[in-house]
Amino acid sequence: MPSNAENSLDFMELRDIASYVAEQVGEYILQESRNSVLLETKSSSSDFVTNVDKRAEALIVNLINNHRPDDSFLGEEGTSQEGNSGVLWVIDPIDGTTNFIHKHPGFGVSIAAKVNGDTVAGAVADPSHGEIFDAAIGHGARRNGKEITLTRSAKLETALVATGFSYKNTKRALQAKVLLKILPCIADIRRMGSAAIDLCSVATGRVDAFFETGLNEWDIAAGTLIASEAGARLSTFTDFDGETLTVAVNPSIEAQFIELLHAAAEGIA
Ligand code: IPD
Ligand code: CA
Ligand code: CA
């Protein structure tokens, strides 16, 4: 049953704001990727943040504030702002910072609107490829304004699977062990470098599944809505290490893929 806050909200309007802002800020980070950037590390020697991540986050908050001054914000680079409208914007200003600093395509902007803990609208921009994905709950997912629906069915042995690795080296060693058991059962693995864009790739059928453990809300809030509105199946499990494993998969291989993940994680930690 929708709450009062949800009743008075237009989720498609929230989606359109997310999409507009993701596109604008996507263009900005693409321009900046051609310049030199100031680097700092965060949780490990491979976890970077740049001056552009911080500026992009401020830009997103400003642009959304122009439309909706009473909303709340949570951003990866430290934004935490309390509003009173019932809408919380969850922001990853650059998802795929490692790609961004290497001038490698595959970095994007992820913006999601949450109400009562549920993501109701969101957008992911992939500016190097000229793509904007968006969705509003109950209203489907789109790529560059055109509806996307997952129609292709998959088989486990020919499945292309995306994943990502932690910034913590000890965790990476365990993730590599899990991968050793998965690889012989599928067609191949892709590590593209942006969880948000990986989830959009599940939505379009470019990959048949995505799994990654230890992701943050800002990495996945928009992408999981886009994938599920396109027809993918989303689930979360506790992994071998006690962290949350996020899975998005083509419905035709859901049961087999989840069984494979469980079998691969057995006895790992
Ligand atoms: C990272 C990317 C990457 C994933 C990492 C994330 P960041 O986000 O989504 O693909 O493997 O787990 O932390 O640090 O580039 O915003
Ligand atoms: Ca991220
Ligand atoms: Ca980021």
Image (tube, rainbow, N blue to C red):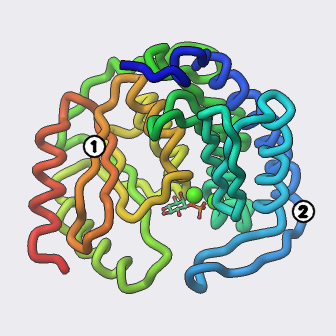
Distance from the alpha carbon under mark 1 to that under mark 2: 39 Å
Position of 29 relative to 208 (above/below): below
Q: Which residue is mark 1?
A: 235
Q: Which mark is residue 142?
A: none
User: Which residue is painted at 53% across and 46% down in the image?
Assistant: 196
Considering depth in this image, is 215 or 115 the residue closer to the camera? 115
Q: Amino acid at mark 1?
A: Ser
In this picture, residue 138 sits left or right of residue 253 = right
Q: Which residue is mark 2?
A: 35
Residue 265 rendering spot, x and y as whole percentages: 16, 67
Disc 1 versus disc 2: nearer the observer: 1
Disc 2 under 8 Å from ligand 3? The reply is no
User: Which residue is painted at 23% across and 41% down in the image?
Assistant: 158
Can residue 201 be seen here? The reply is no
Marks 1 and 2, the one that precedes in the sequence = 2
User: Which residue is painted at 84% across and 74% down in the image?
Assistant: 38
Can residue 258 be seen here? The reply is yes
Q: Quadrant of residue 133?
A: top right
Residue 33 rendering spot, x and y as whole percentages: 81, 57
